[in-house]
Amino acid sequence: MILSTLLLLSAPVQEPVPSDIRVADIKTHIAFLASEELEGREAGKRGGHLAASYVENQFRRYGLKPITEDGSYRIPFKLGADTAYNVVGLLPGTDPNMQDVYFAIGGHHDHAGLGSKLSGAMGFPYEIHNGADDNASGTSGVLELAEYFTAHPLKHPILFMTFSGEERGLKGSEALVNSGVLPNDQIMAMINLDMIGRLDDDALFIGGLGTAEELHDILDPMFENSKLNLELDDRGEAPSDNTNFFHAGIPALFLFTNIHEDYHMPSDDADRINYEGEVKVLNMARDIVVLLDQQSSLTFVNLGGMGIPADFMSRMSDHYRRISARKELKGKLGLRVSVDEALGLVVNTVTGGSAAEAAGLEVGDQVTSIGGSETPDMNMLRRSLAAGLKGDEIEIHVTRGATKMVLTAVLK
Ligand SMILES: [Zn+2]
């Protein structure tokens, strides 16, 4: 790739490279963001807040500057009855004449929580949707690029940002773009990273290339020399946050490694990420921004339309077919419990002919754990059963009178 060669030539040979875009860093970020602890990072909920705080801490660690008067990187917005947080940090540029013309590099940090239908979960209620690709991958990408450019600053300042409420209909980026906090008129280009963790056959989609007059002239030579299998698209809209920047008159690009079988499913996990592939995508994002940095402005073009891969809709319909097949397989235990202050969860109904009855559960049994998870409350009980399919064997620990028992249920 031409540009990488130039960067290498201009860099001192013995320079230490802690600032390179690295698999190990991406793994660390995604391991945390897509962990069970974050409960699927639902916007406005505990897990979503933890994700925003994590990004804020990294921004602070890199030395980015907050852009709010109160010095916080987190910028709240209302999402129904909840408060959710976008996160923004500023890296100043090196050219004194370019300090009021910014780049924005962003991606959403929220996902579908514990099977939140509002946030587009496609698994069962109470299943954790970890969202490793969607969009811990893009969030880790924003962090890696922030760290990289902190060590290799550009002429232009860069606003790094992660959004909440994307899964609720692009609500976080919409709130941010309309907040008056961002210098919308002075953002030369926005780069959106959403689902960049599943590079397959080196196929990367880049949308929004028609949203500024100059983009093709500047970027096409690099694209032609790229080893990636690029699908380029001019249109400015997408089912992602670049849309709101585009609608605000800002040239905006969308980098995306496409829909897959784990899209919005509980199986979108960290161990399925193509980490080497994500490094390739981030190197491309970096190279785009480095090339655009030579410009002092770009000319916005209001070219709408859904900029998505050509096979996006067919991949989605295959996916919906898989999801409805899985719904048919949902397993039931056939048990109702009530909450007793002293005893915890106590069985009050065992459905006739159910898996619970066959396992030997009885009214009055105190349920202490299911499938290896302790069940101190209804929420944990629901979560312990959420992923169960017909035929799954589940171990249930109960206390009956003074006796502790282990029963095995086969879900129906
Ligand atoms: Zn999503």
Image (cartoon, helix red, strand yellow):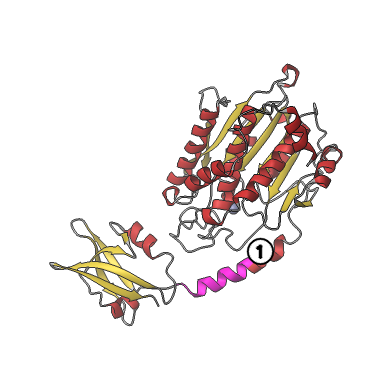
Q: Nearer the viewer, residue 49 or 218?
A: 218
Q: Which residue is mark 1?
A: 316
Residue ID at (54%, 60%): 265
Left or right: 77 with respect to 350? right
Q: What amino acid type is highlighted by mark number 1?
A: Met
Kindly tell me whether residue 142 is visible in this rendering.
yes
Q: Nearer the viewer, residue 349 or 22?
A: 22
Number of residues whose C-alpha sits closer than 10 Å to that of mark 1, classed few (under 14), some (14–19) or many (20 or more): some
Taking the spot 65% from the left edge, 58% from the top edge, the residue there is 259
Residue found at the very far front of the displayed protein: 14
Name the residue located 52 percent from the left edge and 28 percent from the top edge. Answer: 60
Q: Which residues are magenta?
A: 319-330
Q: Is residue 76 left or right of residue 317?
A: left
Q: Residue at x 25, y 77 (%)?
A: 360
Q: Position of residue 18 (x, y in %)?
A: 58, 33
Dominant secondary structure, magenta: helix
Q: Quadrant of residue 333?
A: bottom left
Extreme residue in the top direction: 96
- The N terminus appears in which quarter of the rendering? top right
